[in-house]
């Protein structure tokens, strides 16, 4: 059973061991060691969990390998954003996803498990934004809106060849027997 650090929506953190995390059920079963000898196993509603760190961090692969990974921005409901390169072996279950990631500007691989109830979305991004945070926030939304409108107009008139991309979901493995 993998060791996990469970971060709950209310800020509580719990160290536990769980069976393989598949997010097939709306609850997570865990064994934990507590000061209280009366509790050792629990079922947690997935909706109460913000994020889980699965296993131990390890050294990141070479830059050549990371180039083949997608870049993504995880936007959480609480407003936090995590930018990371995500491995192609991401697993999407019914109630959440498990991603192997290397966060931007770090050199370690971590596996995270995030219930969908904690996310606004996971956005595929083309390149890291190197501007300072203050500059990104000022005109970012207007620039993004202008770019989206220009792409839509170009696509509607057929003047610009839109690049063919594989859907992000098509690059991830599906749960057993899933559709």
Image: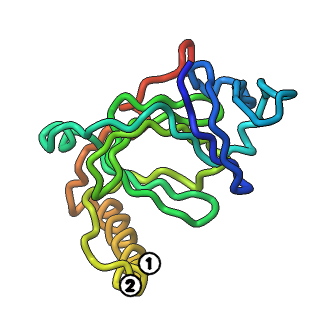
Q: Is residue 167 visible?
A: no
75 up-or-down from 6: above or below: below
Q: Position of residue 44 (x, y in %)?
A: 76, 34
Mark closer to the chain start, 1 or 2: 2
| Residue nearest the viewer, comparing 55 with 179 | 55
- Who's the residue at 66% across and 47% down the image? 13
Which residue carries the number 1 mark?
A: 141
Q: Looking at the figure, which quarter contains the N terminus? A: top right
Q: Position of residue 6 (x, y in %)?
A: 63, 41
Quarter residue 27 falls in: top right
Q: Position of residue 4 (x, y in %)?
A: 56, 33
| Residue nearest the viewer, comparing 173 with 158 | 173
- Who's the residue at 33% across and 56% down the image? 125
Q: Position of 45 compared to 82: left or right?
A: right
133 up-or-down from 7: above or below: below
Q: Looking at the figure, which quarter contains the C terminus? A: top right
User: For the view shown, which residue lies furthest in the right direction?
Assistant: 38
Discs 1/2, front: 2
69 up-or-down from 124: above or below: above
| Residue nearest the viewer, comparing 152 with 58 | 58
- Who's the residue at 78% across and 25% down the image? 40
Q: Position of 95 compared to 43: left or right?
A: left
Q: Is residue 171 visible?
A: yes
Helix, strand or loop at mark 1:
helix
> What label sits on residue 5 in the rendered view?
none
Q: CA distance from mark 1 to mark 2?
A: 13 Å
| Residue nearest the viewer, comparing 114 with 40 | 40
Which residue carries the number 2 mark?
A: 134
Helix, strand or loop at mark 2:
helix
């Amino acid at each position: 059973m993998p060791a996990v650090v469970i971060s709950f929506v209310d800020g509580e953190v719990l160290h536990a061991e769980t069976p393989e995390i598949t997010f097939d059920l709306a609850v997570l079963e865990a064994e934990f060691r507590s000061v209280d000898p009366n509790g050792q196993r629990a079922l947690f509603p997935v909706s109460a969990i913000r994020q889980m760190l699965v296993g131990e961090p390890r050294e990141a692969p070479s830059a050549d390998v990371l180039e083949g990974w997608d870049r993504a921005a995880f936007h959480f409901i609480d407003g936090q954003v995590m930018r990371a390169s995500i491995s192609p072996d991401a697993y999407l279950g019914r109630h959440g996803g498990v991603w192997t990631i290397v966060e931007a500007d770090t050199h370690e691989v971590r596996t995270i498990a995030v219930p969908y109830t904690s996310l606004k979305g996971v956005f595929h991004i083309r390149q890291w934004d190197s501007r300072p945070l203050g500059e990104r926030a000022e005109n970012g939304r207007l620039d993004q809106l202008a770019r989206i409108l220009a792409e839509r107009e170009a696509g509607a008139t057929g003047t610009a060849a839109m690049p063919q991309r594989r859907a992000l979901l098509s690059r991830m493995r599906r749960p057993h027997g899933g559709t």
